[in-house]
Image (tube, helix red, strand yellow):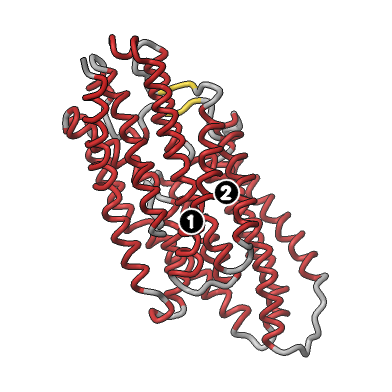
Amino acid sequence: MDIINNYGFVLIVVAAAVGFLMAWGIGANDVANAMGTSVGSKALTIKQAILIAMVFEFAGAYLAGGEVTSTIRKGIIDASYFVDTPELLVYGMISALFAAGVWLAFASYLGWPVSTTHSIVGAIVGFAAVGVSSDAVAWGKVGGIVGSWIITPAISGFIAFLIFQSAQKLIFDTDKPFANAKRYVPFYMGLAGFVMALVTIKKGLKHVGLDIPADQGYYIAIGIAVLVGIVGRWFISRIKLDANAQKDMQFANVEKVFAVLMIVTACCMAFAHGSNDVANAIGPLAAVVSIVESGGEIGKKAALVWWILPLGGIGIVAGLALFGHRVIATIGNGITHLTPSRGFAAELAAACTVVIASGTGLPISTTQTLVGAVLGVGMARGIAALNLGVVRNIVISWVITLPAGAGLSIIFFFMIKGIFAP
């Protein structure tokens, strides 16, 4: 207790610094990953993607990032082990943020799209299991996260495969692709509107006091889907093209329609992502501030002081703008060649998987979901369409993320403990 009372301000300053580093890593890796399909398909330039992400990620983080947050993310450690020694939890949370931030910076430098959630979970498990007690870790929840490495990419990949194949059959493989695009694309627009509305309602709005019941959420999403479909149909009907134009010209115009769709879905995903994943950085930081300001009391939830959310939002935006281009290149060009229609199939599939996960409680990584969807689009064109060397590196990076976060966290934990221990 004496350490918290004597060094409380110093501990908060250190936690804020490493919390910013973690948020910076989220921007450089996770947000860059979310923007990769839009850039790779040339629906957006990298500057436009960064601008959209800056506006909508920050808006999501600041407006819908939450008034309170769980002090211990995902319930993976038991707080009762720290009641008599709260300073160990403070050291641990600082170590976890530092470890996850360093790992994300390293992975981003190599262009590896890794899971920020798994980075922070691995780091928290590391210091708790080795620094405190292995019994302090809820190993069942860790097992569920490991299982999600296979399940979520498989689900999103399968959905992306179906969406891509349907667009091929209904539009691209027909004699009149542009005429069929006018007929069928409004349905894709409506489906995108439905899924994006659900993602925003489930992931974003619940943090700002708009906790809409599930049935009402579906009604609102259906209404938005119908509206988006009607408006989209009107806009597409105004595009004039010679019915006898060559197929290449028709394909180019169909892709332009999908490119507009991608911009809309990218904005929605950025808002939902900002509202949700900023918690990976601010949750442990809020825990440290809460414990220090309460004199060592550990609560299940911590109210956010005013500066934490802006710190997380600015960190995310800075990470994306300064270091995000490497991961964007991997997602956008490294795995397979993307066009706007293929990128749209991947983004829509990823959003569908997020909705399914929200409804079923399935542990999920947005990174793995989107990578799985891009793989699904590539598989639909045959195994030769995939760059298997890049895919192998991504899989390896996923497997080593948990132990890397845990190992770094253990080192930092004992270093910090040695510095502050009497």
Residue 371 coordinates in the image, percent (x, y): 43, 61
In which quadrant of the rendered view does residue 394 lie?
A: bottom left
Q: Which residue is mark 1?
A: 33
Closer to the camera, 353 or 305? 305
Query: Mark 2 = which residue?
Result: 270
- Is residue 101 toward the left or the right of residue 351 in the image? left
Local packing at callout 2 (Cα closer than 10 Å; few below 14, some 14-19, many 20+) is: many
User: Which residue is at a point 55% across and 45% down the rendered structure image?
Assistant: 272
Q: Earlier in the sequence, mark 1 or mark 2?
A: 1
- For the residues bearing labels 1 and 2, Cβ distance under 8 angstroms: no
Q: Where is 182 relative to 397, above or below?
A: below
- Who's the residue at 62% across and 39% down the image? 59
Report helix, strand or loop for mark 1. Answer: helix
Estimate the x, y position of residue 329 in percent, counting from the top left: 49, 64
Above-or-below relation of 246 to 393: below
Q: Determine the CA span between mark 1 and mark 2.
A: 11 Å
Relative height, residue 159 to residue 222 (above, below) = below
Tell me the quadrant of the picture where the N terminus can be found. Answer: top left
Residue sitting nearer the eye, 194 or 203: 203
Amino acid tagged 1:
Asn
User: Is label 2 in a helix, a strand or a loop?
Assistant: helix
Q: Residues within 10 Å of mark 1 (few under 14, many from 20)?
A: many
- Left or right: 273 in relation to 399: right
- The amino acid beneath tag 2 is Ala
Q: Which residue is farthest front?
A: 419
Q: Within the image, what quadrant is residue 345 found in?
A: bottom right
Does residue 20 appear to the left or right of 92 in the view shown?
A: right
